[in-house]
Image (tube, rainbow, N blue to C red):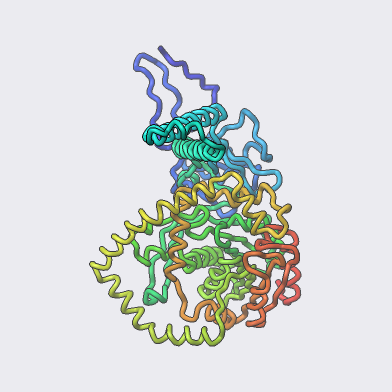
């Protein structure tokens, strides 16, 4: 059979690894050549600093002749450059237009922006973030089969006990009372429920489990969660006190972050307060937590660029292997590792364009919950002469009593040399490395596998994030929207999400990045920096970090403290406009001018 090639039809998109279709040698016509999609690394290298807007289009990648036509990242549709030469069109997210409803003719591989939050994309139709329910016919069949197996099992065991009794067994049968009947029915019901649950779980795990996609594939297909999404390779060095303060290489590491405020939307130099704004997220979240507030916050406070990155173990930042059982492998997952990533991103922006020519640079650093420690570490890592305004939202800082803290500082100073020697011996001891590997293998079997499965089952529930935000995080449960749940649900489709979360947890339990003196010393060192101000914000209905705890931190260090009444743990997500207005008023109150 000969295949006719209709050149009027659009060329279907294929994966980079797909082999071109071959025609029979008997055919005299050959289809036009197909252009392969660029690889994930090539796409990453083509990411521009400006990005694109939701629902819009971008110039495409360079053509075969090498002329430049812009780049694509996160989503969008390619188009020809001004030269008019034809280019391969990459179907990406925002081309279908705004709206969170998809038509029946929509490509299941495309993503569309939401109408309620245009800076957030919906999942592609082909991606399933949660366990899918069994079709009704299969559920009915399983129920019937479970009932039959439970009935056979119950009746068989009952008959065996009666038939194996004494000669008076007939009397037992004649005098079965209602208690025995209820007991038999309860056993039948429990067995049927157990068989049905196990069968349902097995089918879901085999055929209907949640999607898990590696970050390289997400970048390649343009399936990042926002038009503000960027994915770059970051490399830095980091000094860890518990490992002897030796400089440890971090990366190269693929980092997902949000970037806004460039191009025409950037404030003029005359109105600009800050060269860079950077935001750190809290535990269980990602940079998407700052998505509702980041663009308006950058604009209103006069920041040239707004940034927010995913810490390692969360979001779509790469998750390096940490299976050898060594502390060094957990450094990227530590708060110090996240601070090194954020610092590198900020410095990269400070070294660009007009910012590089400024004598005195200025940054605004925002941190939320667990991310407040990361923000304080960034303040210390940035150049000392950089002007800094730091806003800590519901800070999860460990502040022991003054006496306990002094004792900790003295003990840390006494053991500084011992820690360094232990770090050196750990590097040199072959036997220790073998033991670490054996312990890590046991841990993976005993801890990682069952806990990873438990996390997947819990987070894989369709309503998990919505119910969690309503019951624990938000100040008013009725304020939680579908977009709020979607921002927390997006990172869970990343391959290795459970493994990354467990690695981060181990880094915290092992105090990989412990600082002598703890958070008290950290905050004190930041306050001793020149031209640095710290503000603390709390939600009045915060159930995770009570506002009294945040107030105690502010009073202990004589810091400006603000409470947003009626808000919970994430006030910048619950009501972004209220939060931005409050920050703008605080900056004016603090007389922080442009």
Q: Pinpoint residue 420: horizontal percent, then vertical percent.
A: 34, 79
Quarter containing the C terminus:
bottom right
Q: Is residue 322 left or right of residue 369?
A: left
The answer to whether 194 is drawn above or below residue 303 in the figure is above
Between 326 and 13, the one nearer to me in the picture: 326
Label tally = 0
Quarter containing the N terminus:
top left
For the view shown, which residue lies furthest in the top direction?
1
The quadrant where residue 577 appears: bottom right
Q: Pinpoint residue 282: horizontal percent, then vertical percent.
A: 57, 62
Name the residue: 62% across, 48% down: 486
Can residue 458 be seen in this snapshot? yes
Name the residue: 61% across, 70% down: 395
The answer to whether 362 is drawn above or below residue 461 in the figure is below
The answer to whether 153 is drawn above or below residue 593 in the figure is above
The quadrant where residue 261 appears: bottom right
The answer to whether 424 is drawn above or below residue 230 in the figure is below
Name the residue: 41% across, 64% down: 330
Can residue 73 be seen in this snapshot? no
Between 249 and 146, the one nearer to me in the picture: 146
Q: Is residue 359 left or right of residue 567?
A: left
Q: Pinpoint residue 518: horizontal percent, then vertical percent.
A: 50, 78
Q: Pinpoint residue 489: horizontal percent, then vertical percent.
A: 58, 49
Between 166 and 124, the one nearer to me in the picture: 166
């Amino acid at each position: 059979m000969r295949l006719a090639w209709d050149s009027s039809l659009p060329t279907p998109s294929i994966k980079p690894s797909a082999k071109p279709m071959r025609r029979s040698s008997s055919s005299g016509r050959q289809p036009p050549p197909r252009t392969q999609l660029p690889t994930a690394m090539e796409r990453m290298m083509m990411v521009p600093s400006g990005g694109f807007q939701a629902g819009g289009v971008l110039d495409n990648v360079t053509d075969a002749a090498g002329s430049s036509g812009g780049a694509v990242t996160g989503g969008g549709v390619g188009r020809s450059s001004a030269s008019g030469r034809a280019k391969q069109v990459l179907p990406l997210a925002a081309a279908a237009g705004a709206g969170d409803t998809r038509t029946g003719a929509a490509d299941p591989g495309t993503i569309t922006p939401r109408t309620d939050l245009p800076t957030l994309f919906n999942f592609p139709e082909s991606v399933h973030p949660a366990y899918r329910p069994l079709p009704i016919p299969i559920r009915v069949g399983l129920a019937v089969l479970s009932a039959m197996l439970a009935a056979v099992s119950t009746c068989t065991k009952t008959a065996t006990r009666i038939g194996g009794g004494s000669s008076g067994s007939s009397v037992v049968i004649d005098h079965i009372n209602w208690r025995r009947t209820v007991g038999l029915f309860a056993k039948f019901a429990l067995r049927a429920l157990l068989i049905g649950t196990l069968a349902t779980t097995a089918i879901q795990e085999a055929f209907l489990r949640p999607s898990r996609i590696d970050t390289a594939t997400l970048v390649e297909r343009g399936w990042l969660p926002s038009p503000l999404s960027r994915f770059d390779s970051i490399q830095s060095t980091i000094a860890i006190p518990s490992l002897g303060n030796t400089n440890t290489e971090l990366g190269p590491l693929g980092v997902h972050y949000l970037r806004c405020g460039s191009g025409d939307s950037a404030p003029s130099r005359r109105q600009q307060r800050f060269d860079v704004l950077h935001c750190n997220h809290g535990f269980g979240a990602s940079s998407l937590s700052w998505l509702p507030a980041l663009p308006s916050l950058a604009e209103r406070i006069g920041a040239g660029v707004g940034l927010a990155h995913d810490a390692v173990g969360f979001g779509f930042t790469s998750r390096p292997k940490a299976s050898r059982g060594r502390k060094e492998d957990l450094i990227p997952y530590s708060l110090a590792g996240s601070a090194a990533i954020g610092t590198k991103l900020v410095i990269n922006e400070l070294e660009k364009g007009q910012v590089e020519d400024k004598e005195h640079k200025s940054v605004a650093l925002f941190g939320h919950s667990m991310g407040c420690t990361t923000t304080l570490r960034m303040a210390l890592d940035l150049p000392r002469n950089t002007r800094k305004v730091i806003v800590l939202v519901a800070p999860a800082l460990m502040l022991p009593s003054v006496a306990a803290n002094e004792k900790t500082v003295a003990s840390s100073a006494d053991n500084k040399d011992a820690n360094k020697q232990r770090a050196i011996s750990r590097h040199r001891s072959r036997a220790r490395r073998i033991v670490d590997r054996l312990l890590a293998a046991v841990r993976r079997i005993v801890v990682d596998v069952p806990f990873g499965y438990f996390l997947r089952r819990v987070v894989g529930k369709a309503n998990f994030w919505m119910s969690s935000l309503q019951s624990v995080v938000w100040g008013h449960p009725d304020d939680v929207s579908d977009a709020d749940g979607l921002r927390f649900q997006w990172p869970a489709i990343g391959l290795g999400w459970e493994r990354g979360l467990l690695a981060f947890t181990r880094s915290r339990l092992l105090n990989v990045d412990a600082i002598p003196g703890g958070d008290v010393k950290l905050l004190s060192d930041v306050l001793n920096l020149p031209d640095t101000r710290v503000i603390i914000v709390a939600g009045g209905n915060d159930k995770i970090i009570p506002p009294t705890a945040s107030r105690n931190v502010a009073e202990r260090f004589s810091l400006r403290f603000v409470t947003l009444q009626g808000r919970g743990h994430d006030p910048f997500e619950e009501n972004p406009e209220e939060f931005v207005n409050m920050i703008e008023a605080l900056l004016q109150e603090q007389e922080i001018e442009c």
